[in-house]
Image: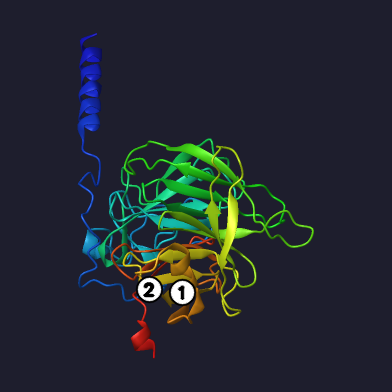
Amino acid sequence: MTRMVIVLAAVLVAAVVALSAPEPDAGPWPDALPWQDGRPTAAGAVAPDAATSDAAAPDAATPDAAAHGARAGAPVAPFAAPAGLPVAIHTADLPANEASGLVASRKFPGVFYWLRDGGGATTRRPRAALWTIRLGGDAHALPVRRGENFPFAQVFAAPNGDWEDVVMDDDDNLWIGDIGANDCVTEQYLYRTLEPEPDTDDPFVVTAKWPVSFPDPAPGCRTRNAEAMLWLDGELYLFAKTANSPVYRAVFPAERGDDVVLEPVAEFDAAVNKISVSTVSTDRTRLTVAGHARYWVFEADPALRGDAYLKQALAGKPVHTGTFASRAGNASVEGGSYVPGTHDLLFVAENKEMFLVPDAPSAAAAR
């Protein structure tokens, strides 16, 4: 009896110690994204042996792990670093495929949200969820929650028919665009959600839902397929994924539940087509759009607002364009965002690749 009491006491003490141990990476959020002298030099370069399947893989360290206290010489991690350690963006994959939208948080420096537009759904890789990236200096993703580099949180009351993009409005609400319609007849919706603390298990709560459809579908179609949205000056814009990628401004109805009306604003010339990404730099001097394999940087007048801003930017020629250095040849990039306070761009692709593209040449340098 005495021996049993001693054993039970030892188990209790061990449990108390385990519960009181601090979580990895429990420090405060960074105040900024300090590229400083550590600007990435291998943006877009991806290790050729990084895995692409959805299967979970054992923890492994990044090639520059020695600088962060990890195991030197370990193989490249397919999607995550050991708990509590950073992972180089250009050597790691996302934890799930079909990434199709990316936006930077304003409330939480370094935090980006991305979503999936398809793929298999499991408890570890759901579709009705938003996933988080926390970008630190030197092109590294940092742990977000309990040592996880790319955790997710469920989105309730918003089924994922074909989520294609996510944007942040002026009041720090996230908007999910269920706007894919490859068959040109699928119903499309916009969902507004609250942004929870990213290092908690809190879900994203939907506060509003609106039906939306394009006013000028092709013959025999009910709407257009779309994959890119942009929040600009208090307005939401959608880009149809078709020739010239026309841009529409969303006009919200007075009554909840009525359809959003899309008003045509502008379109690109023939050289820019089938846009899946759109993003504006913090200083408003650049608008970048991207398709699956290429991106285009346009110079914009920060003094202009809304429709006028887009019309002026899209009327000009790109000051810079480039392709994504995908190990697969075509990464199918469908999400992207400027890194706040910089002209660097972070992109995510359907095949799980990530690309951090350094500051592009200015218009003066391109001439």
**In the rendered image, which quarter is residue 320 located in?**
bottom left
Locate the C terminus and report the quarter of the image it occupies.
bottom left
Relative to 241, say whether 197 is above or below: above
Q: Residues within 10 Å of mark 2 (few under 14, many from 20)?
A: some
Q: Is residue 204 visible?
A: yes
Residue 146 x/y as whole percent:
31, 42
Residue furthest to the bottom in view is 367
- Labelled disc at residue 128: none
Amino acid at circle 2: Asp
**In the rendered image, which quarter is residue 262 located in?**
bottom right
Task: Determine whether the residue tagged by mark 2 lies in a helix, strand or loop.
Answer: loop
**Is residue 288 toward the left or the right of residue 359 in the image?**
right
Amino acid at circle 1: Gln
**Gap between marks 2 and 1, in whole Å?**
7 Å
Name the residue located 46 percent from the left edge and 68 percent from the top edge: 308
Residue 82 x/y as whole percent:
33, 52
Q: Is residue 354 visible?
A: no
Q: State the residue in front, 164 or 304.
A: 304
Residue placed under numbered mark 1 in the picture: 312
Relative to 13, say whether 319 is above or below: below
Of labels 2 and 1, earlier in sequence is 2
**Is residue 199 toward the left or the right of residue 9 in the image?**
right
- Labelled disc at residue 301: 2
- The reply to whether the C-beta atoms of the residues labelled 2 and 1 are less than 8 Å apart is yes
Name the residue located 58 percent from the left edge and 80 percent from the top edge: 271
Q: Residues within 10 Å of mark 1 (few under 14, many from 20)?
A: some
Locate the N terminus and report the quarter of the image it occupies.
top left
**Is residue 258 toward the left or the right of residue 71 in the image?**
right
Relative to 105, say whether 255 is above or below: above
Residue 95 x/y as whole percent:
46, 53
